[in-house]
Image (cartoon, rainbow, N blue to C red):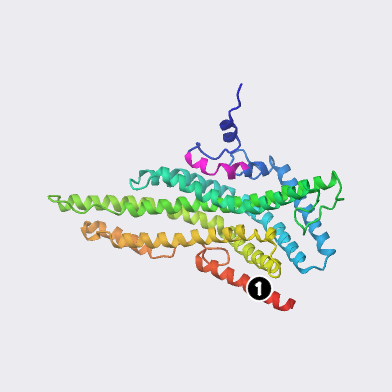
């Protein structure tokens, strides 16, 4: 009897609601979450059921924490201390991100169901949107993020394995001790634990970034469909003013109903990423500064690859934050270009109300009060570089 791999994949990537094409986009993220015990979209997920996963994760992070302190306490090399600081930032930030993410699981489930039902259906009914292209683009976005975050894991693992087979036993990260002798089998056990830690840290980063990109990608495409709803064909010859007015009113009604759903969705995203949106900014600001300190004198290419996921993380949040502002502007422009003079007088009041509502600011607002945007990204990068220059000047 053959093994049906598709059934196995479906089993370990279960989500709320019926399985659709949308679920296939995030299969990799769902399976990674399932392995590490935080696949909260699984209807059967509970703290109690996956307590062992969380407990083992806690022990692993404690083990790496003390291993990093061991290196810091036995060296005076500023670059090695800075690299250890990067590890400590990961040890602190990642568990916090994971806990906040899991505590928002009910909001997340609601968002996911809306994305794969309401928004997906809105995109499908739009005659101008080719759903296959949308799905393929969604896969490219998520897999690109996956690749950017996996690069450091690949480099560290390949380097360590290559040296191992050449007879040299090196640490997976030179800033973290295994707290074990460098002899067989202790060395192999320590490297295994460090590999699991590196993979899980990357998995947490992947999950946060990929899910945000997924949720925002479908919102942006659905927003484009809203613009298309307002593109009503001009009044044709021999068409009565009343018939044309009815077409305009029907279009405006569809726009209003769909827009209300999308605004509710965006408000829910804001509720979930109020703090989750702050963490990647803080993580990037601190970590980019540390990476610059490590590679400022002598470029450590093995460590420098951490710049890829750091830039990917800060870029994806702020780029999609900027896209929301652009989509809001596109909607305002489409409304202003709408032939509202063709509406019946009683329907123009509804149009005015919609226009007034669209004048408010839309975006992802974090807990510290700033909106995710390219301006925010530039401010974070500037702050990180300024901190680097200050620390470097003090060091010399």
- Judge left or right: residue 384 versus residue 343: right
- Judge left or right: residue 181 versus residue 235: right
Comparing 215 with 288, the one in front is: 288
Residue 168 in the image: above or below residue 327:
above
**Is residue 8 in sight in this rendering?**
yes
* Residue 24 in picture, x, y percent from top left: 52, 40
Residue 337 in the image: above or below residue 19:
below
Q: Quadrant of the C terminus?
A: bottom right
Residue 334 included in the magenta stretch of the image: no
Residue 22 included in the magenta stretch of the image: yes
Looking at the rendering, the stretch of residues picked out in magenta corresponds to 21-31
Q: Quadrant of the N terminus?
A: top right
Q: Residue at x 82, y 61 (%)?
A: 71
* Residue 137 in picture, x, y percent from top left: 46, 48
* Residue 314 in picture, x, y percent from top left: 57, 61
Comparing 10 with 385, the one in front is: 385
Q: Main secondary structure of the magenta part?
A: helix
* Residue 207 in picture, x, y percent from top left: 60, 50
- Judge left or right: residue 234 versus residue 65: left
Q: Residue at x 38, y 53 (%)?
A: 224
Q: Which corner quadrant of the image does residue 127 belong to? A: top left
Residue underneath mark 1: 387
- Judge left or right: residue 188 versus residue 288: right
């Amino acid at each position: 009897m053959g093994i049906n791999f598709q059934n196995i994949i479906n089993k370990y990537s279960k989500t709320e609601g019926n399985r659709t094409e949308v679920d296939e986009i995030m299969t990799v993220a769902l399976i990674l979450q399932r392995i590490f015990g935080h696949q909260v979209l699984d209807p059967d997920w509970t703290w109690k059921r996956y307590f062992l996963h969380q407990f083992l994760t806690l022990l692993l992070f404690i083990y790496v924490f003390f291993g990093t302190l061991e290196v810091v306490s036995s060296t005076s090399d500023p670059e090695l201390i800075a690299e250890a600081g990067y590890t400590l930032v990961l040890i602190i930030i990642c568990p916090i991100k994971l806990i906040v993410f899991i505590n928002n699981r009910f909001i997340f489930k609601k968002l996911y169901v809306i994305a794969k039902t309401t928004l997906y259906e809105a995109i499908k009914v739009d005659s101008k949107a080719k759903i296959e292209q949308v799905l393929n683009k969604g896969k490219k976005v998520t897999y690109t993020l996956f690749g950017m975050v996996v690069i450091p894991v690949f480099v560290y693992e390949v380097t360590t394995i290559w040296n191992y087979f050449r007879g040299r036993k090196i640490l997976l990260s030179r800033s973290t001790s295994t707290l074990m002798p460098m002899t067989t089998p202790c060395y192999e056990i320590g490297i295994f634990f460090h590999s699991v830690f590196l993979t899980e840290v990357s998995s947490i980063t992947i999950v946060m970034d990929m899910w945000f990109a997924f949720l925002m990608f479908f919102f942006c495409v659905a927003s484009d469909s809203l613009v298309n709803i307002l593109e009503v064909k001009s009044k044709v010859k021999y068409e009565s003013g009343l018939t044309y007015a009815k077409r305009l009113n029907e279009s405006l009604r569809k726009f209003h109903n769909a827009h209300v759903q999308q605004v509710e969705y965006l408000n829910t995203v804001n509720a979930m990423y109020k703090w989750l949106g702050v963490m990647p900014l803080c993580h990037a600001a601190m970590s980019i500064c540390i990476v610059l300190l490590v590679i400022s004198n002598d470029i450590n290419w093995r460590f420098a690859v951490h710049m890829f996921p750091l830039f990917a993380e800060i870029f994806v949040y702020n780029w999609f934050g900027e896209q929301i502002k652009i989509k809001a502007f596109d909607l305002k422009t489409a409304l202003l270009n709408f032939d509202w003079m063709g509406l019946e007088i009683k329907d123009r009041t509804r149009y005015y109300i919609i226009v007034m509502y669209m004048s408010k600011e839309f975006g992802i607002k974090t807990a510290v009060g700033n909106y995710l945007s390219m301006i925010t990204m530039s401010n974070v990068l500037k702050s990180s570089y300024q901190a680097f220059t200050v620390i470097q000047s003090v060091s010399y």
